[in-house]
Amino acid sequence: MRPISYPIRRHELYDLIDSGEGSDVEFKRQFSSPEKIAREIIAFANMRGGYLLFGVDDDGTVVGVRSEKSELEEIEHAARWMIDPPANIITENVHAGWGMDIVLVRVHESASKPHTLVEYDSAGKRLKEQSHLGFVRFEDKSVQASREMMSVMRGQSPGGAPLKLSIGYNEKVLFEYLERHGRITVEEFAHLVNIGKRRASKILVSLVRAGTVLIHTFEKTEFFTLAK
């Protein structure tokens, strides 16, 4: 998350817009739904943080927001009631010139990962059985986090389970494969050492937590590489 002043200066705002959407910037022409905004906030909080700009088109054109007060209320509602645990955000209304306002939302990297989406039934009642959907940022998109990514985030949180790691046959085969081929998926690792996908996932997650292996998100696929 690139540093900008608070409150943001106009030249910083336009620098942010000129840089385009990316891993830490998302443009929204207008507010759509609390659930969609919650997904964007979750993705930034679960990664390295970022900025949501309302009143900016996908191509960077400033269109402004109609009612910054109602926008701010909806955003605060999404952060508090549609995210578990609730996300800490900072919102500000920015005068962009030409009589237009932009709503800027700062989402800092969270120390309470993973954040997940809170779901409600058709009557507006919070579901007891949650799907625990988490999201992460991939380039300029927010995508659903895999089981492995969610496990890594849980393990890295302050209340995560202690790391238990042993290097045996499976791990050695994995390291040798990565030295030769550079990357591997959970499915490929499971096939390589003839174990179940769940066990392969646990081994890879433990190695990521230990810092010997890195996890990478590419669209809807994740793969693992050796840490340099």
Image: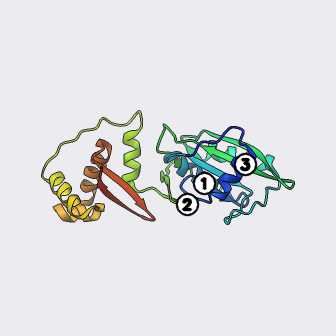
Q: CA distance from mark 3 to mark 1?
A: 16 Å
Residue 177 to residue 44: above or below = below
Residue at the location (75% across, 57% down)?
55
Q: Are marks 1 and 2 in contact (CB under 8 Å)?
A: yes
Residue occupied by mark 1 = 25
In what element is the residue under mark 2? loop
- Residue type at tag 2: Asp
Residue at the location (65% across, 48% down)?
78
Q: CA distance from mark 2 to mark 3?
A: 22 Å
Of mark 1 and mark 2, the one earlier in the sequence is 1
Residue extending farthest to the right is 99
Residue at the location (71% across, 53% down)?
14
Residue at the location (23% across, 61% down)?
189
Q: Measured from the top left, where is residue 16 in percent x and y? A: 65, 52
In what element is the residue under mark 1? strand
Which image quarter: residue 209?
Answer: top left
Residue 64 visible? The answer is yes
Residue 181 as seen in the image, left or right of residue 29: left
Model colouring? rainbow
Front residue of 141 and 120:
141
Residue occupied by mark 3 = 11
Q: Are marks 2 and 3 in contact (CB under 8 Å)?
A: no
